[in-house]
Amino acid sequence: MTLVGKEYQPFVFEVEKGRIRMFAQAIGDTNPIYHDAQAAANAGYSAIPAPPTFPFTIIMEANQAFMILEELGIDKTRTMHGEQSFTYYGDICAGDTITGRQKVVDQYEKKGGALQFIVTQIQLTNQRQEHVCDLNMTIVIRNV
């Protein structure tokens, strides 16, 4: 069964400055632009910006990371997060409303079908309809 081309319903996420601050603290980034609005403004941002990998938080909150597995009835203990990449086109800042949509862009097998790979892309836009980021994610499924 091929999933390539399948698109999921859009989701919406409100970016809050408190979440950005907690994320920056969790990854150990002490750059003041992630904690202080004036430092962010002095650096040219409209508000506190999200650190580079913050969009993964967005897709986790929106249950996008596990949606395909749940739909296919795949036991999560047989899976692994294989790869993640981000392509940025603009900033994501506190106060933004981010809309995303996940699409399956590739699916293939290795090791004679013992491993299945599902590659998705999630395009993120802000409330001004500006394309701000693409997330590409590969899920590896061990077939028993």
Image (spheres, helix red, strand yellow):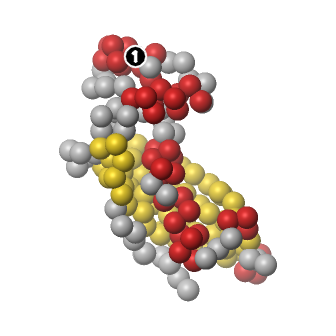
- Apparent side of residue 108 relative to residue 5 in the rendered image (left or right): right
Note whether 130 is above or below 78 in the view shown. Answer: above
Image quarter of the C terminus: bottom right
Name which residue lies at 44% across and 20% down: 35
Q: How many marks?
A: 1
Residue beneath disc 1: 36
Dot 1 surroundings within 10 Å: few (below 14), some, or many (20 or more)? some
Q: Position of residue 82 (x, y in %)?
A: 66, 57
Asked if residue 81 is positioned above or below residue 37 in the image, the reply reads below
Residue 104 visible within the image: yes
Q: Nearer the viewer, residue 130 or 101?
A: 101
- 14 in relation to 93, above or below: below
x and y percent of residue 79 in the render?
69, 65
SS assignment at label 1: loop
Determine whether, in the image, residue 139 is placed left or right of residue 24.
right
Q: Residue at x 58, y 70 (%)?
A: 69
**Percent x, y for residue 94?**
34, 32
Q: Amino acid at mark 1?
A: Asp
| Quarter of the image where the N terminus is located | bottom right
In the picture, residue 123 is in which quadrant? Answer: bottom left
Res. 86 visible in picture: no
Q: Taking 106 as reference, is 38 above or below it?
A: above
Q: Residue at x 59, y 61 (%)?
A: 138
Farthest residue in the left direction?
Answer: 128
Q: Residue at x 74, y 71 (%)?
A: 142
Q: Position of residue 2 (x, y in %)?
A: 53, 82
